[in-house]
Image: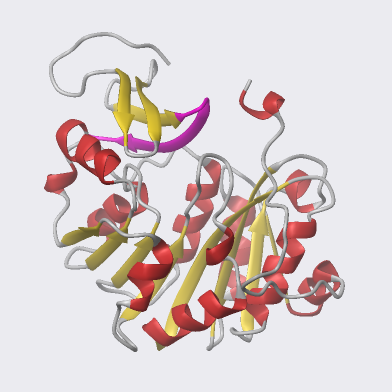
């Protein structure tokens, strides 16, 4: 990454509602931009190609989205930052209606001013936390909910509980899909509890991750897809293994073994949210 002055987005450090963020230009792709906070990359967008996804975990989320039924989607994104996936959905599924919940209003304004957010069609941004935004949505109104919310490098605990999963299920249509980004490391204790939580609400669940992360050998992202109806397990397995990340897809009895009896998370539980060791981001 390099910072330099140019017409259009201006690289630099910007104050936002919850601290400061860095806007960095990709050295290898002049149209690629990263938002980073406290040294942790939060979002990558390519302003000339919304289908270019730089982060591996976002590529895995796109694998799931691409396997959903054809046509436009009614999508809800809990956690926005630079709105990478909303841009992707708008580009690959024209006509989609999307809502983004992002509590940092100054960050949203920065993305509007610097990263062409207004150019994304049929996108509505709500300056709300995920729990409040989801509670305000109508029953059976979404085909897809993407939960990718982090405060720095940690996921807000109130979005990881059985109570929140129940509200997400209320908003999803009967054939809708929930996508969740989890970050965890050695032992994967938090990921196992989150999976137990999600399986308590959604009977069909698949876990996708790079093999080293799946085995708990290193800190990284794990993607969960969940639904009340059958997920395209064969397609997920094939697409995940054949992509750049060469990820594994675990479901069924193998997923039950992975969870290994972990307890679901509930409101009020005392839980340590995993954060990456300093070496992960240099």
Q: Nearer the viewer, residue 161 or 121?
A: 161
Residue displayed at 74% across by 67% down: 193
| Left or right: 188 in relation to 280 | right
Q: Point out the residue furthest to the top here.
A: 4
Q: Magenta region, mostly helix, strand or loop?
A: strand
Residue located 53% across and 65% down the image:
159
Residue 14 rendering spot, x and y as whole percentages: 30, 24
In this rendering, the count of numbered labels is 0
Please name whichever residue, 65 or 9, is drawn nearer the observer in this view of the structure. Answer: 9
Which quadrant would the N terminus be assigned to in this image? top left
**In the shown orientation, is residue 78 left or right of residue 166?**
left
User: Which x, y percent locates residue 77?
Assistant: 36, 61
153 with respect to 64 (left or right): right
Residue located 74% across and 79% down the image:
252
Indicate the colouring scheme.
Answer: secondary structure
Q: Tell me, yes or no, if residue 48 can be seen here.
A: no
Q: Nearer the viewer, residue 51 or 108?
A: 108
Identify the residue at image location x=46%, y=30%: 37
Magenta span includes 276? no
Magenta stretch, residue numbers: 37-47
Q: Is residue 275 visible?
A: yes
- Residue 105 percent coordinates (x, y): 26, 46
Residue 142 drawn at (x, y percent): 33, 78
Instruction: Name the image quarter holding residue 254.
Output: bottom right
Image: 162 above or below 87:
below
Q: Is residue 92 left or right of residue 250?
A: left
Q: Quadrant of the C terminus?
A: top right
- Looking at this view, is 267 or 275 the one in front? 267
């Amino acid at each position: 990454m390099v910072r330099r002055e140019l017409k259009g987005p201006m690289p630099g450090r910007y104050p936002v509602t919850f601290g400061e963020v860095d806007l960095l230009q990709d050295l290898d792709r002049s149209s690629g931009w990263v938002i980073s906070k406290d040294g942790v990359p939060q979002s990558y967008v390519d302003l000339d190609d919304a289908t270019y996804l730089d982060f591996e975990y976002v590529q895995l989320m796109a694998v799931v989205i691409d396997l959903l039924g054809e046509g436009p989607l009614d999508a809800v994104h809990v956690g926005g930052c630079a709105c990478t996936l909303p841009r992707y959905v708008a580009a690959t599924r024209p006509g989609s209606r999307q809502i983004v919940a992002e509590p940092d209003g100054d960050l949203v304004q920065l993305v509007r001013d610097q990263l062409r957010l207004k150019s994304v069609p049929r996108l509505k941004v709500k300056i709300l936390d995920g729990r409040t935004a989801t509670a305000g949505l109508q029953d059976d109104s979404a085909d897809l909910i993407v939960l990718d919310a982090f405060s720095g490098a940690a996921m807000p605990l109130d979005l990881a509980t059985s109570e929140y999963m129940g509200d997400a299920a209320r908003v999803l249509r009967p054939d809708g899909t929930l996508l969740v980004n989890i970050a965890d490391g050695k032992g994967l204790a938090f990921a196992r509890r989150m999976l137990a939580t999600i399986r308590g609400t959604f009977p069909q669940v698949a876990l996708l991750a790079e093999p080293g992360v799946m085995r708990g050998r290193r800190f990284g992202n794990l993607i969960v897809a969940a639904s009340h109806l059958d997920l395209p397990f064969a397609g997920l397995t094939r697409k995940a293994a054949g992509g750049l990340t060469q990820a594994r897809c675990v479901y069924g009895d193998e997923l039950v073994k992975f969870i290994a009896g972990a307890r679901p998370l509930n409101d009020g539980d005392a839980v340590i949210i995993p954060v990456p060791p300093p070496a992960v981001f240099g």
